[in-house]
Image (cartoon, grey):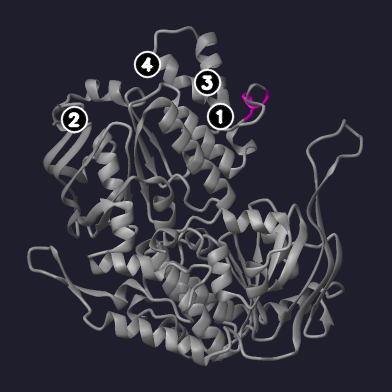
Amino acid sequence: MMKFLEINKLKTFFHTRSGTVRAVDEVSFSLDKGEIVGIVGESGSGKSVTCHSILGLLPQPPARIEGGQIRFQEENLLSLPEGSLRSLRGKKISIVFQDPMSCLNPFMTILDQVAEPLIIHENISREEAERQAIEMMEKVGIRDAATRAGSYPHEFSGGMRQRVMIAMALVTKPDLLLADEPTTALDVTVQAKILEILKSLRKELGISVLFITHDLGVVAEIADRIVVMYRGKIVEQGKVEDIFRKPKHPYVKGLLACRPTLDCKYHTLPTVDDFLETKLKDDGTIEIYEHTDADHRLRQLKAVNLSESGPGSETKKTLVKVSDLKVYFPGLGGFPGGAKEQVRAVDGISLSVKKGKTVGLVGESGCGKTTAGRAILHLIKPTAGTVVYDGKSLGGLSRETLVEYRKKMQIIFQDPYASLNPRLTIEQALTEPMVVHQIGKNYNQRRERVVSLLEEVGLSSQLLLRYPHEFSGGQRQRICVARALAVEPEFIVCDECVSAMDVSVQAQVLNLLRDLQKKRQLTYLFISHDLSVVKFISDDVVVMQAGKIVESGTAQEVYANPKDDYTRDLISAIPSPYNLVK
């Protein structure tokens, strides 16, 4: 029987000046009508290239489909002329991209963009297209769709923009939806709503979904079957329950192990490297070897946890004390010349961080946690309240005196690529803060410190003359950690620093932060919307909602016995494949 979508021995290679990259190498799988299949793998595994190969969206050159077939409703898409393929896009096959802000047109209203596929593919009037567009917007959960239809993308939150993308993809009632990382970096509650929307629309419209993600918890929530990719090849595929209960391939075992859970028993997270090693063969293919002592390695990691009390050393000294901190921004409303309503981003929060400890600050996007972190460092001027660092109030300090405190207080930003200057080599980026703060007497001393820092964060000194674009996301974040450490700080604000990373890279960075904390007696304020990660790395947890703290306590207390309804909602929204395992 012919499958609804069947991919057979697909080979998509990228031919570059430095050689040929086998992005997709003889990949085969199928999708039935009304089925949701999840493709899982780290960045660079070939999952997005597979998805884009279906619709012919890859730039050719450098990409080239070297072989195989993609049969959709018994028709080979690879042999179709461009005109026929264009008529399929947005009509029978639609796609939801990862970053809605970069995919939506900033100059067009939301209504125009959702209605556009109908105007292109259906022989209907503009009024009817707009009516159907508003109806689909309501269906995907956009409140007051008719009123908000005239808004522009920047006026929507991240979750709402993703709903707009889903509405655009589904407005023509396609047979197949390609969802390429549609929930990455979204809050757990928004993510849960997006997954629920996709499941209900699958049931209502009978669409098939190819769901691409690096998050095993997400794919366990939504998929009927799973395809796991590694280095361009499929290493395992099957039903969700079979993959999670009895994984066969070492890579799959590694992915399952390195994601922190609420009942995580590891002090140091396992990584994929604990389960396998790879060897590049002469023909460019990868040979995978499983570590026979993987179970022994995991037992050692658990044993370490039993012998240590927590991520930070025991101390009673308070390093940072925040009292009634407020940060207000002027609103956009109000009459000309009249008073404008203020946006209360942070509205009277109080917390303290003890030396050598980690406080996790958790909440949804827009709750004020990032603003709070920057106000504590005085990167944003607080409207009211006090921040006391090591017994000294930062509020009345001059600009020159505050610069001295910058050596003691640092920040690691969410997006390492955006926070590194693309025109500076890594050596220049790491040396710059030393020059500003007059650390090191000369170039040679500063270069020695840079080499030492790179080695401390697990990178080679041979990379000094490379630029940020030449590194992977995980490597760039390690560089940002090294830059924060360059001035020998005592306190670091980690602002969503692992939110969009693959689970294995995330595990490596979390392990690095813990190791550095133990070695240097660092103090962290760890900001995140990922409650599992916050639980793993934090001693104490503070939960924010709408600019206020709604709950705080030790990590164990907050997660075991949450007192506030909002905290309970956040915890219940966490997707977890381990429910299947149990």
Which residue has dot 2 on it?
A: 77
Which residue has dot 3 on it?
A: 133
Mark 3–mark 1 CB contact (< 8 Å): no
Q: Nearer the viewer, mark 3 or mark 1?
A: 3
Local crowd at mark 3 within 10 Å, few (<14), some, or many (≥20)? many
Q: Point out the tag, 4 or 1, that comes first from the N-terminus.
A: 1
Please tell me whether mark 3 sits on a helix, a strand or a loop: helix
Which residue has dot 1 on it?
A: 107
Which of 407 and 423 lies nearest the eye of the viewer? 407
Q: Point out the tag, 2 or 3, that comes first from the N-terminus.
A: 2
Q: Which amino acid does label 2 sit on?
A: Leu
Q: Is residue 468 above or below residue 59?
A: below
Which of 445 and 573 lies nearest the eye of the viewer? 573
Q: Distance between the residues labelled 4 and 2?
A: 19 Å
Which of 385 and 399 lies nearest the eye of the viewer? 385
Which of 445 and 507 lies nearest the eye of the viewer? 507
Numbered range of the magenta stretch: 147-151
Asked whether, in this view, residue 539 is left or right of residue 115, the answer is right
The residue shown at (54%, 16%) is 130
Please tell me whether mark 2 sits on a helix, a strand or a loop: helix
Q: In this view, does 68 lie above or below 466?
A: above
For this orientation, the residue located farthest to the right is 338
Q: What residue type is labelled 3?
A: Ala
Asked if residue 236 shows in the view, the reply is yes
Place of residue 559 in the rendered image (x, y in percent of width and height, measured from the top left):
63, 68
Place of residue 478 in the rendered image (x, y in percent of width and height, measured from the top left):
45, 73
Q: Which of marks 1 and 2 is in front?
A: 2
Q: How far apart are marks 2 and 3 (CA)?
A: 28 Å
Place of residue 150 in the rendered image (x, y in percent of width and height, measured from the top left):
63, 24
Local crowd at mark 2 within 10 Å, few (<14), some, or many (≥20)? many
Q: Distance between the residues labelled 3 and 1?
A: 18 Å
Q: Distance between the residues labelled 3 and 4?
A: 13 Å
